[in-house]
Image (cartoon, grey):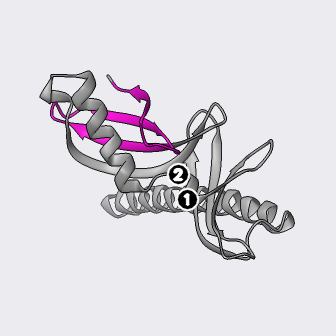
Amino acid sequence: MKKWILIAILVIFLAIGWTGGHLYQSTLQSQKDFENQGLNIVKEKEIFSTIDNVDTYYGTNAYRIITGKNSKGEELIAWVPEEGEVITRKKSEGVSKEKALEGLYSTLKNLYDDKNRDPKEIHSIKLGMEDNTPIWEIIYIDNRSRLTYYRGLFETGQYWKFIRP
């Protein structure tokens, strides 16, 4: 009897493991398909001669953020939505990650005296798009261990919006 119970438990664990693995693989595949769709769009429009990086931004809408160079050697960034028009900017039109981070600290200093809002740990700094506005999104943990989203304008890095508890 114990033998049948052990076999049943083993079969259940194998089924759960297989289902979990399948779910994980299908999620990765849909992410790759989403990125490839964005790459195909910019290749059709001949925006880039070389592509350096592809990232995904999930905000109000999902965007593929593609960076690379055009035929003139200029560094470009393209925000490719699931539906709608591709938005491109020269990298030089915006600020760097470091300047965007400086914008966060400057905003916190100017808006709040409360040191509990200061970043304890930066999780990510990446480009995004909200309301047809190119942004830098900085995700961080504040001194109260709360997850906080800072969105600064791509052109200046200055405050556009906070999402926090």
Q: Residue at x 55, y 45 (%)?
A: 128
Instruction: Write down the quadrant of residue 38 in the picture.
Output: bottom right
Vertical side of 148 occupied by 112: above or below: above
Closest to the observer, 53 or 165? 53
Q: Which residue position is annotated with label 2? A: 94
Residue at x 64% of width, y 54% of height: 64
Estimate the x, y position of residue 133 in percent, counting from the top left. 61, 36
4 falls in the magenta region: no
Residue 72, given in percent of the width and then of the height, sits at 72, 75
> Horizontal placement of 164 versus 84: left or right?
left
- Image quarter of the N terminus: bottom left
Residue that numbered label 1 is attached to: 92
Left or right: 152 in relation to 109: right
Q: Position of residue 23 (x, y in %)?
A: 56, 55
Residue with the most extreme right position? 44
* Span shown in magenta: 136-164
Residue 101 bears which disc, if any?
A: none
**Which of the pair 92/7 is nearer the observer?**
92
Relative to 111, 7 lies left or right: right
Amino acid at pointer 2:
Gly
